[in-house]
Amino acid sequence: MILSTVEMHTGGEPTRIVVDGWPRFSGKTLLDKRREAREHFDHLRRGLMLEPRGHDGMYGALLVEPDHPEADLAVLFMHNEGYSTMCGHATIALARWAVDSGRVKRSEPETVVRLQCPCGLVVARVAADGTVRFESVPAFAYALDRIAPTRTWGPVTVDIAYGGAFYAFLSADSIGLDLLSSPMRAIVDAGEEIAEAAAKAVPIVHADEPDLAFLYGTILTDGGNGADRPSRNVCIFAGRQIDRSPTGSGVTARMALQMARREARLGDERRFESCTGDVFSGRIVRDAPPVGGRKSVIVEVGGRAHQTGEARFRFDDDDPLREGFSLGL
């Protein structure tokens, strides 16, 4: 078996776009295909994401046939541990690839790309210079100032918000860390432990779709709001994976949190910086219908992706490591 991919990155965070070679799905809806991928084709995800073809920080986007009537293309997001419901950095990469490759016909001054994600339809706009901005699904604050007991720091206070995926947020200095000077391993350890603690302390429910109801990761911030200067955040997800980008779904959720705390209003734009120095913009565009009784908003996220290459990956039957491996560092 041979799988063909296009390799891209957004702020240093990879997106391996699978364009050919994946077996056909029998499921009718995108969430059906997501379950089918997990149950029947997970060896291919592991083989593409993990060593020797990938690494523990790899991220993938599998193109599938859309079932949404307005979608130009549909995608399943994948990583070292499983399948995401939404990914902003990959959305930025996919939108640019769709236009550059001719999959979606270029128009001026911007090209609209409608991407069906597991969380819903995401509308992206690609400018002539390759920059991308997209409107994600309704975002909302789920829980504010909740206590999560941890082994290392005792009880910590977190906010939980949804931006296509659920994240636990807290300021790094609240547990004695600094996003500029603390070792990345310490930040990763904290993100993993706090995600586990928050998931136990705050049960997650999504009113529209049970498959979306899980805590995806932890986002540690520098405590700023991104108004006067970019606010740094580091997202730890899928166990110990580090997002090299500012995390598009996390930016969406952060803006919903700011709205809930009256730190931002409709039309306000903020900037958020990743561990590589890459910056995404976030802007609250409009109100959206409530989700499970919670006030929600539509957020526009902006960023830029770049193509790094193309690849053809073999899966030989006699290769004992054909399905990939992780050293679990």
Image (cartoon, rainbow, N blue to C red):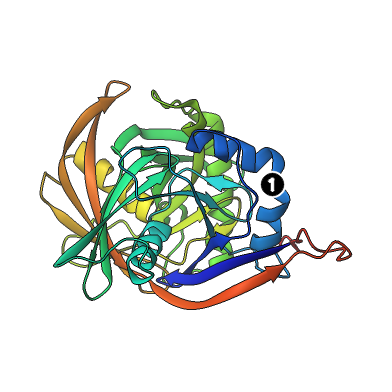
Quarter of the image with the N terminus in it: bottom right
- Residue 183 visible to an observer of this rendering: no
Instruction: Give the quarter of the image for residue 180.
Output: bottom left
- Residue at point 40%, 61% (across, down): 94
- Residue at point 45%, 25% (across, down): 205
Quarter of the image with the C terminus in it: bottom right
- In the foreground, 157 or 154: 157
Of all residues, the one furthest to the top in this rendering is: 293
Residue wearing tag 1: 41
Tell whether 236 sits left or right of 320: left
- In the foreground, 217 or 89: 89
Residue 324 point in image, percent of width and height: 75, 61
Tell whether 21 sits left or right of 113: right
Of all residues, the one furthest to the bottom in this rendering is: 308
Tell whether 80 sits left or right of 129: right
Which amino acid is tagged 1? Phe
Residue 69 point in image, percent of width and height: 33, 38
Instruction: Give the quarter of the image for residue 262.
Output: top left
- Residue 55 visible to an observer of this rendering: yes
- Residue at point 28%, 37% (across, down): 138
Please tell me how crowded label 1 is: few (under 14), some (14-19), or many (20+) other residues with Cα within 10 Å.
Answer: some
- Figure disc tally: 1
Q: Secondary structure at mark 1?
A: loop
Residue 227 point in image, percent of width and height: 17, 60
| Image: 150 above or below 192 | above
Instruction: Give the quarter of the image for residue 265.
Output: top left
